[in-house]
Amino acid sequence: MLIGLTYNLKSYYLAKGFSAERVAEFDCEETIDAIENALINGGHEVVRIGSLEQLIERLQQAERWDLVFNIAEGMYGIGREAQIPALLDAYQIPFTFSSTEVTALALDKGITNMIMKAKGVKVAEFTVVSTLKEVGRVRIPFPIFVKPIAEGTSKGINKFSKIESKEALLAQCEYIFKTFRQAAMVEEYLPGREFTVGIIGNGAEAKAIGVMEIQSVGNADKSAYTYDNKQLYEDRIIYSIVDDPKVEKLALKAWKIMKASDAGRVDVRCNAKGEPCFMELNTMAGLNPTYSDLCILCKLKGFPYDKLINTIVDSAISRSK
């Protein structure tokens, strides 16, 4: 099978002057090489395409592929992860991971939380604010937690994200508005254990690869899985596979409610009572074989990287038939 590979290359944007945090979700050469090699080992022919702009150019030149393996996060707007899926839909070219509409919805943490709450999945008390006036009307008891409405890789989550006062809340929301040019998610702080659940498959056939606990140690910020903790994970984080049926059940329910596809992660954190709460659904989890959470989880479970990549392809093919 001829497979096109779409991605945003981190080094390209760093060379253009973008900050390391701005391009944190983008991929390095190691990731692209690893995916390409896994696909070749799976018997496929691979064509590197690149970003949205490069995909448009190749489509205009009448180039086509049997499937596109898409890991491009996109640059601008809350719907950025859905831009390449939408374009491929228009050209009737199958692609990996969730549909255009699911990809767009899942990046918006506020909408996703509303869906989960409506479907009976436990979430922290939350609200979404987009102006400082709205921030002044927040009534969630302290401590609370603040993060951008539509970012991944812990972007915008730092030592100031756990909030204890109105003044700190205003300051952190203003930082998010100015830095990320998007609304802020303000939610009840969850002080309990944190997990991520790796999931593969579609619909009723979806299953959990495993449940991985994320524990902060040493000099790590203990309040959350912050951007700095994630970047310095080797010294700050311990990852371990745990047997927690409640966490796995909640994650699978969330995955099926959103109709997510092929592979991804569901993040879960426990409240003060020890009850697992849905935090986020990642429809396009990082695939660096060394440091991406899903790949760390798979390695701990003895699930080979090449098998993960080709399982994603097989799942996407099954949906396109």
Image: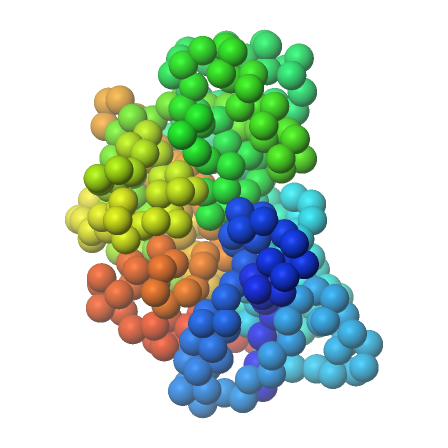
Q: Is residue 163 above or below residue 4?
A: above
Q: Residue at (72%, 71%) from the top-left corner? A: 54
Q: Is residue 60 above or below residue 197?
A: below
Q: Is residue 252 above or below residue 114?
A: below
Q: Nearer the viewer, residue 131 or 178?
A: 178
Quadrant holding the C terminus: bottom right
Q: Residue at (26%, 38%) from the top-left corner? A: 219
Q: Nearer the viewer, residue 139 or 249?
A: 139
User: Is 261 situated left or right of 179 in this image?
Assistant: left
Q: How many marks?
A: 0
The picture quadrant where one finds residue 3 is bottom right
The picture quadrant where one finds residue 223 is top left
> Residue placed farthest to the right in the image?
60
Q: Residue at (22%, 48%) from the top-left corner? A: 238
Q: Position of residue 255 (x, y in %)?
A: 43, 49
Q: Is residue 41 visible?
A: yes
Q: Nearer the viewer, residue 58 or 110?
A: 58
Q: Position of residue 76 (x, y in %)?
A: 69, 49
Q: Position of residue 15 (x, y in %)?
A: 63, 61
User: Is 303 situated left or right of 89 in this image?
Assistant: left
Quadrant holding the N terminus: bottom right
Q: Is residue 276 visible?
A: no
Chosen colour scheme: rainbow
Q: Position of residue 320 (x, y in %)?
A: 58, 72
Q: Residue at (46%, 35%) from the top-left corner? A: 157
Q: Nearer the viewer, residue 111 or 238?
A: 238
